[in-house]
Image (cartoon, rainbow, N blue to C red):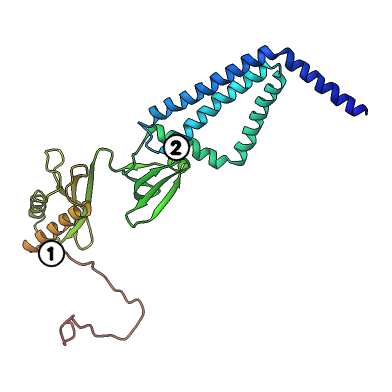
Amino acid sequence: MKYIKQVYEAFEQFLSTIVTNIPNIIVGVVILGIFVFLGAQLKRLFTRVVATKAKDELFVRFLGNFLRWVIIAIGIVILLNQMGLSKAASGMLAGAGVSAIVIGFAFKEIGENLLSGIYLALSRPYEIGDLIEVERMESIVKAIQIRSVYIRTFGGEDIHIPNSIIIKNPVTNLTRDGLRRWEFIVGLDYDDDIELALSKINEGLSQVEGIEQSDTLKPFTLIDDFGTSNINLKVLFWIDQDTLQHPLLEVINHAKLTVLRIVKDNDFYIPTDIVELKLYQNTQPFEVKLEGSEQPASD
């Protein structure tokens, strides 16, 4: 009976407090309604503004809902204060803080990826459809999601990279301004006329459709290094991928075929690597025959 009486008295006191604070409660409910309306309007405004920068609809909707519930939570705290339940409001805020710490430790990686996703959506270092290089992979950006970036490699592999990895590692945007320089090596014999080869290669590349030919972006060839059996020439040229009317790999392949044709037409020689064999043990002599010959090679 004693406990029932205590419960009854506590309930009676609670009702008395409610009745006494009815005007404040009405004001608090009105304020809560205003905050609910304000949260909905801010969500709509935020979605409309951010949607112009972040094309990921799921991400924009998530941020809009998050902002709305933050506004509503503020309204609930004000309502509790108006009802005379300031201790409950303080407990709610304290509980939210403790919960945030606990959840933060439990879902550290998820939270890190979420914040990274927010930063990527606002800073936009790349757009959907851009060619990027990250973690030594060249791939096309297909979607920017809350937790990860969805990319597709040239081999057709679909990969989801966590946003935190994107933030912590260098990302090369290969299509931001459209221009990209390509290069490859061709090795010629030391007896070839290297100056003539440089001139012929530059002249041939100037005829390849898709390669930039402006004064500052003309294709050029230079001596890269001197190998054991050949002189390595580095062929460099620019391609504007924004205005390209042919597949990129087709233009690159055309450039290599052009250089190969120049080598053949001008009787330049691409030597094979020289291999030197040394026998350090005392062995019996053996015969070496040249290819296509039945006679042993002379000393």
- The quarter of the picture where residue 169 lies is top left
Horizontal side of 173 relative to 169 (left or right) equals left
Residue located at (13% from left, 64% from top): 269
Residue located at (11% from left, 53% from top): 201
- Mark 2: give few (<14), some (14-19) or many (20+) Cα within 10 Å: many
Figure label count: 2
At label 1, counting other C-alpha atoms closer than 10 Å, the crowd grade (few under 14, some 14-19, many 20 or more) is: some
List the single residue furthest toward the right. 1
Q: Is residue 281 visible?
A: yes
Q: Is residue 54 left or right of residue 186?
A: right
Residue at 19% across / 53% down in the picture? Answer: 252
Q: Determine whether 115 is above or below 258 in the image.
A: above
Find out whether the residues at labels 2 and 1 contact each other: C-beta distance under 8 Å.
Answer: no
Q: Depth check: 183 or 241 in front?
A: 241
Q: Quadrant of the N terminus?
A: top right
Give how far across and how far down residue 295 sits, in percent: 16, 87
Locate the C terminus by quadrant: bottom left
Q: Secondary structure at mark 1?
A: loop
In the rendered view, tell whether residue 135 sits above or below residue 290.
above
SS at mark 2 in the image: helix
The type of residue carrying mark 1 is Tyr
Is 87 placed left or right of 182 in the picture? right
Q: Nearer the viewer, residue 245 or 134?
A: 245
Residue 151: x, y in percent? 38, 48
Of residue 103 and residue 3, the one placed in the foreground of this image is 3
Q: CA distance from mark 2 to mark 1?
A: 58 Å
Which residue has dot 1 on it?
Answer: 269
Name the amino acid type tagged 2: Phe
Q: Which residue is mark 2?
A: 59
Quadrant in the rendering for residue 82: top right
Which mark is in front, 2 or 1? 2
Q: First in sequence: mark 2 or mark 1? A: 2
